[in-house]
């Protein structure tokens, strides 16, 4: 997680849930009578009421212009200053939800006794279910309206808002057949446990976790979307008859409304994609990937002759799969290797290519993912009684799924490959290959400790079967070192990468791909150890060689561009960094896709550089995009997802939006400690940033305690000469100055400057900035 390299900002208090005390004390509101004035609005009559508010039709009454609004009059009040601040924040968040399918918040305020009110856009329409039933809408129109609601909810989720009360009466359809989602009044910021609002829900539409009073996530809104879909499908139907719906729609409703949150769709987008699949006669994810089912959907959708492009695409996948498999599985018996390779290739021809046959896939080209899904489904039957062959294809499929960023699918294939490799009679090389695939997956999913034990077993087998001078052993050892780097042990990783670089150069030459990989990895270690000149000396020739050998858009070339951009940021040259990172982002989007893990890594770095350039309004949507995608792809607890939460918190802290930073910091630290990552460098940086937020909020004792914790842990984990410790000392000095401990502040700055000089050198931008801060502190009036 980045640490602000400019002002080493510190200060601010951690809070609990952002809106936890907005409506703390419930009291019954006197009903407003026609003619009552609220703000600049005059009440006309009641539109409806619920457990949290009464909604009135009101008109603007200040003579400026005519306007009808829906006035939401809250039934709870909170007169204290904290409640007022939180109300203003929620009002601003709601006002920012500008979407064609969300009823806009126009105005809002609080009465003298602290009662909140909202002026919402007035929608003259019918509730969604009544509209569908009254007009006897066909299925396609019903689904189109639900998809409009999905777009609105996904838009809100991307901005950190849950709705928490999605139901037909909160979706009005106007005369233009436009669905408008109402009532974000009990919405809460994602990941926060708003206790008073959590008790308000609509029976029949509330998720199980909402009924229990648990902390809510996007899964709760997805449950309610499933219940909404169910109601829309039934609207206007004869109550005595069973609902008429396809097996696809029944499966979609069942998955969206599963009792367990983790069994539902991961995102609103994936729920909506299944609805679109129904409209387009494509397979829906909720029904799995059975081959007969997939083919039936394909046949229904396509009526024309097959295009040759479909076959060509799958032939390419087959060739890649065989090549990857041959690299992974090295056999000491040529005949055995040939038998397995022949069987695997026959499988790829018979099963993958048959899916692209004109009779089976008319008129379209299979995607890589679809080709892999078909292979996965067919492998067990095709290789019954042939564990070596099935294990080879399962390992290959796992590797390819990983490259696509589809980790759940990769895990399934790797687990099956491991089970086959442990069967009686399996060869050591097969077990090593399966373990290697699983170890790589553990790395990708953030289980660095789990990957280490697997790599140790792989390396022991490869040492016996191939030798420690083999390409296989060097590659596996490099991956093991990369796991150490991601776990924060940069020095241990550097020692291994340096030894591997020397070995690869001696065995294969300076420009061999393995030698270039080791050099790039060692450069990463140098970067985070503060040894930036050493890193640059390694990366410049790596980029030149990879670009020449592989081309500018090869994943390894783009990876090097990303590393150079990150290094330039650490060197204090954000403008140069931005150019390199833009090159990496553009290339990865075009070759890997916008949500691939590597692409997200580069977009995150791009946002970090923009943040350092103080271009906060440009950095914010990028940080949010990465966070949303990582939550969906990796889950909330993955190290990279936690890093994204912390990054967004730092942005808001530097942007002087502490009310947005606090809950993100709080959630990240709780997850870090729960996952046993309290000593990771990212967590230490988080503690430093939290201390900064606490100082800004005037909680100096708390800030000092957090600074001292970060410094002590930093010395223990990173060493006394780590540049990160110098950063922590600088922030500590600023807080001590705020606490009127002038002499202590100057002493800590002197310590920080000496440490910067030792770690990154006196000419480094961070060392120069530290000297400037020391001068500012020294010139400040002594209290």
Image (cartoon, grey):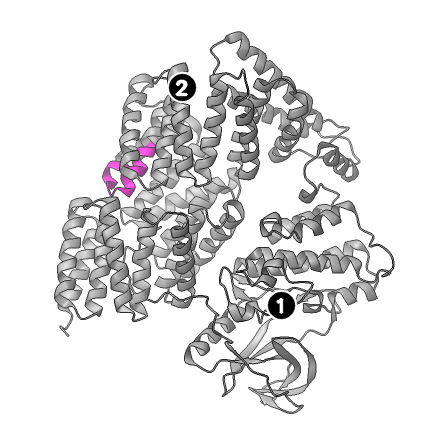
Q: Residue at x 83, y 66 (%)?
A: 134
Q: Nearer the viewer, residue 286 or 581?
A: 286
Residue 521, magenta (yes or no): yes
Q: Give the numbered dot on residue 533.
A: none
Q: Dot 2: what SS?
A: helix
Dominant SS in magenta? helix
**Residue at (48, 31) in percent of width and height:** 438
Quadrant in the picture for residue 353: top right
Instruction: Bin the neighbour count of mark 2 within 10 Å (Cα to Cα): few under 14, some 14-19, many 20 and up.
Output: many
Q: Do callouts 1 and 2 mark residues in contact (Cβ within 8 Å)?
A: no
Q: Residues within 10 Å of mark 1 (few under 14, many from 20)?
A: many
Residue tagged 1 = 201
Quarter of the image that includes the C terminus: bottom left
Highlighted range, magenta: 520-535
Residue 462: assigned label: 2
For the residues carrying marks 1 and 2, which lies nearer the camera in this image? 1
Pinpoint residue 659: horizontal percent, then vertical percent.
41, 68
Residue 269 at least partly seen: yes
> What residue is drawn where x is 43% and y is 58%?
667
Residue 360 to residue 464: above or below: below
Residue closest to the eye, 655 or 112: 112
Q: Is residue 296 above or below residue 505?
A: below
């Amino acid at each position: 997680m980045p640490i602000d390299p400019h002002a080493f900002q510190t200060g601010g208090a951690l809070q609990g849930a952002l809106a936890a005390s907005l409506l703390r004390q419930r009291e019954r509101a006197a009903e407003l009578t026609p003619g009552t004035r609220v703000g600049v609005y005059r009440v006309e009559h009641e539109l409806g009421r619920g457990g949290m508010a009464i909604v009135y039709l009101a008109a603007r009454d200040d003579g400026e212009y005519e306007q009808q609004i829906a006035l939401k009059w809250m039934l709870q009040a909170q007169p204290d200053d904290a409640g007022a601040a939180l109300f203003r924040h929620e009002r601003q968040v709601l006002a920012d939800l500008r979407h064609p399918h969300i009823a806009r918040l126009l105005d809002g305020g609080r009465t003298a006794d602290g009662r909140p009110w909202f002026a919402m856009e007035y929608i003259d329409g019918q509730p969604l279910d009544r509209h569908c039933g009254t007009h006897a809408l066909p299925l396609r129109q019903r689904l189109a309206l639900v998809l409009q609601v999905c777009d609105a909810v996904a838009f809100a989720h991307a901005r950190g808002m849950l709705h928490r009360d999605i139901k037909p009466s909160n979706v009005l359809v106007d005369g233009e057949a436009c669905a408008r989602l109402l009532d974000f009044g009990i919405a809460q910021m994602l990941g926060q446990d708003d206790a008073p609002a959590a008790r308000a829900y609509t029976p029949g539409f509330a998720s199980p976790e909402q009924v229990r009073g648990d902390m809510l996530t996007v899964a709760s809104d997805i449950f309610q979307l499933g219940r909404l879909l169910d109601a829309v499908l039934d609207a206007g139907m004869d109550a005595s008859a069973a609902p008429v719906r396809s097996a696809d729609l029944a499966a979609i409703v069942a998955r969206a409304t599963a009792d367990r949150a983790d069994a539902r769709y991961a995102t609103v987008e994936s729920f909506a994609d299944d609805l679109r699949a129904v409209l387009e006669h494509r397979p829906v994810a909720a029904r799995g990937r059975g081959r007969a089912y997939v083919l039936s959907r394909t046949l229904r959708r396509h009526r024309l002759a097959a295009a040759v492009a479909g076959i060509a695409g799958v032939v390419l996948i087959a060739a890649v799969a065989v090549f990857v498999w041959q690299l992974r599985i090295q056999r000491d018996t040529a005949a055995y290797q040939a038998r397995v390779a022949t069987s695997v290739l026959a499988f790829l021809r018979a099963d993958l290519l048959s899916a692209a046959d004109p009779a089976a896939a008319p008129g379209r080209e299979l995607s890589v993912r679809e080709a892999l899904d078909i292979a996965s489904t067919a492998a067990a039957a095709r290789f019954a009684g042939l564990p070596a062959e099935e294990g080879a294809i399962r390992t290959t499929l796992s590797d390819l799924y990983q490259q696509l960023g589809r980790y759940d699918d990769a895990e399934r294939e790797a687990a099956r490959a491991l089970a086959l490799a442990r069967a009686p009679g399996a060869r050591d090389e097969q077990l090593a290959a399966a373990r290697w695939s699983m170890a790589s997956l553990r790395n990708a999913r953030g289980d660095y400790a789990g990957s280490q034990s697997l790599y140790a077993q792989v390396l022991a087998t490869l040492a016996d079967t191939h030798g420690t001078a083999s390409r296989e052993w060097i590659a596996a050892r490099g991956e093991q070192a990369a796991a150490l780097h991601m776990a924060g042990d940069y020095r241990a990783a550097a020692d291994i990468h340096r030894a591997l670089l020397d070995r690869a150069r001696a065995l294969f030459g300076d420009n061999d791909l393995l030698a270039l990989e080791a050099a790039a990895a060692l450069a990463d270690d140098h970067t985070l150890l503060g040894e930036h000149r050493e890193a640059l000396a390694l990366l410049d020739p790596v980029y030149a060689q990879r670009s020449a050998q592989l081309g500018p858009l090869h994943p390894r070339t783009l990876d090097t561009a990303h590393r150079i951009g990150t290094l330039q940021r650490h060197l204090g040259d954000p403008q140069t960094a931005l150019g390199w990172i833009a090159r990496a982002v553009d290339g990865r989007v075009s070759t890997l896709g916008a949500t691939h893990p590597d692409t997200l890594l580069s977009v995150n770095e791009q946002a970090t550089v923009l943040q350092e350039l103080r271009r906060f309004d440009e950095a914010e949507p990028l940080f949010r995009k990465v966070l949303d995608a990582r939550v969906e792809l990796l889950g909330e607890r993955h190290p990279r997802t936690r890093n994204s939460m912390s990054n967004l918190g730092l942005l808001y802290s530097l942007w002087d939006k502490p009310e947005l930073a606090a809950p993100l910091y709080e959630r990240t630290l709780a997850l870090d400690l729960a996952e046993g990552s309290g000593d990771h460098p990212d967590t230490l940086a988080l503690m430093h940033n939290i201390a900064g937020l606490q100082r800004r909020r005037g909680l100096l004792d708390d800030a000092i305690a957090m600074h001292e914790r970060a410094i002590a842990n930093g010395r223990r984990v990173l060493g006394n000469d780590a540049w990160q410790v110098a950063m922590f000392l600088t922030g500590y000095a600023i807080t001590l100055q705020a606490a009127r401990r002038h002499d202590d502040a100057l002493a800590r700055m002197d310590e920080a400057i000496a440490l910067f000089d030792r770690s990154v050198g006196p000419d480094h931008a961070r060392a120069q900035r530290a000297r400037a801060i020391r001068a500012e502190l020294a010139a400040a009036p002594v209290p």
